[in-house]
Amino acid sequence: MDELRFAAVGLNHNHIYGQVNCLIRAGARLVGFHEKDDTLAAEFTGVYKDAPRIAALEEILEDRSIGLIVSAAVSAERAELAIRAMQHGKDVLVDKPGMTSLDQLTKVRRVQAETGRIFSILYSEHFESPATVKAGELVAAGAIGEVVHIVGLGPHRLRRETRPDWFFRREEYGGILTDIASHQCEQFLFFTGASDATILSANVDNLSVPDKPELQDTGNIHLSTGRATGMIHVNWLTPDGMPTWGDGRLFIVGTTGTIEVRKTVDLAGREGGNHLFLADRNGVQHIDCSAVDLPFGRQFLADIRDRTETAMPRERCFKAMELALSAQALAEQNREKN
């Protein structure tokens, strides 16, 4: 395979660094970036000194040697950017959320089908989390039997003083379920092996930032595949005393065992993150997942080369966003009624 050349477009969320590093680790080459904001551009150049800043987006889109666009632009702008990139013959990897409305999702689906390009979302709380990857290996090996229930917790620190203005505008960030809970929706589909699910209930609220009424700082989703159920809770309420951005947790209940994933911290326990606790017929064990390999980048580059879907099936990528967006819409309808 020839070296994959890629460019970054839109650096508005620092997840762009995770995206770029994931691809570089896998052997791709960052050949440039486009960003209108001088401060964001300067920060990016400080990390990737060999990647030139390209003034015109069209220059990247029309460069046939660039096969992939990665983006962490303002959330509401990612879908249109992805559409333009695919229409210019490029594959796309964006940060979550990949889009902020069901209408955007429909358009991205249509253009992806028309162009045959790869559109994917780097759900980092799965693919960049060694403990979550290990949990997937254990479930696939039958370690806990059939998965019947999942609880996904995604608390985050607000870090209000560091957030740009668009972060507090509903139309631009998409709502808390669209944003954060898309992670948990993808994991629910992955661990249950389901291709679809039903949103049973959903709610959002602003409980701590009354002067920013468009921000939602808490959200919940209850969903079901008809056989397995799930509960999702996300928030922007991580206290300042927490040694990490949030105590992300995943609980997986199977017919013969359970798994608990402590992604970032084991409170008052073991140091560091990536802790997995497995309980089955033989007892209970702790598994240190800090050295678990992260295959997404390699698989994604192979998918670009072979036109396959090994890193993540396209339909799961889209369905996770469909669930998050549908839950967001339902939650806001419920909030208006109340």
Image (cartoon, helix red, strand yellow):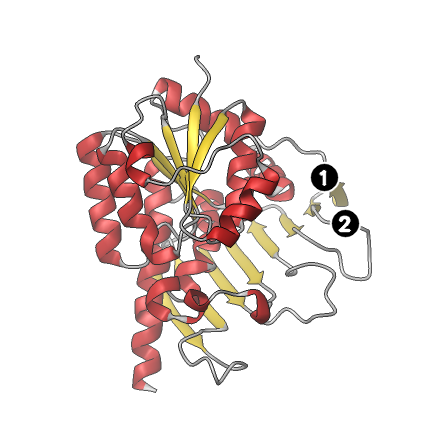
- Residue under the image location 25 percent in, 45 percent down: 108
Query: Can you give x and y, in whole percent of width and height, for residue 155 in the image?
Result: 58, 64
- Looking at the picture, which amino acid does disc 1 mark? Ser
State the image coordinates of residue 320 (x, y, percent, origin top left).
Answer: 38, 50
Front position in the image: 131 or 15 = 15
- In the image, taking residue 260 as reference, residue 230 lies left or right, namely left
Q: Estimate the x, y position of residue 126 in percent, counting from the top left.
A: 54, 44
On the question of residue 85 being in view, the answer is yes
**In which quadrant of the rendered view does residue 156 lie?**
bottom right
Residue assigned mark 1? 290
* Mark 1 residue element: loop
Residue furthest to the top in view is: 1
Contact? badges 2 and 1 (CB < 8 Å): yes
* Left or right for 20, reference 309: right
Taking 172 as reference, is 125 above or below it? above
Residue ID for mark 2: 272
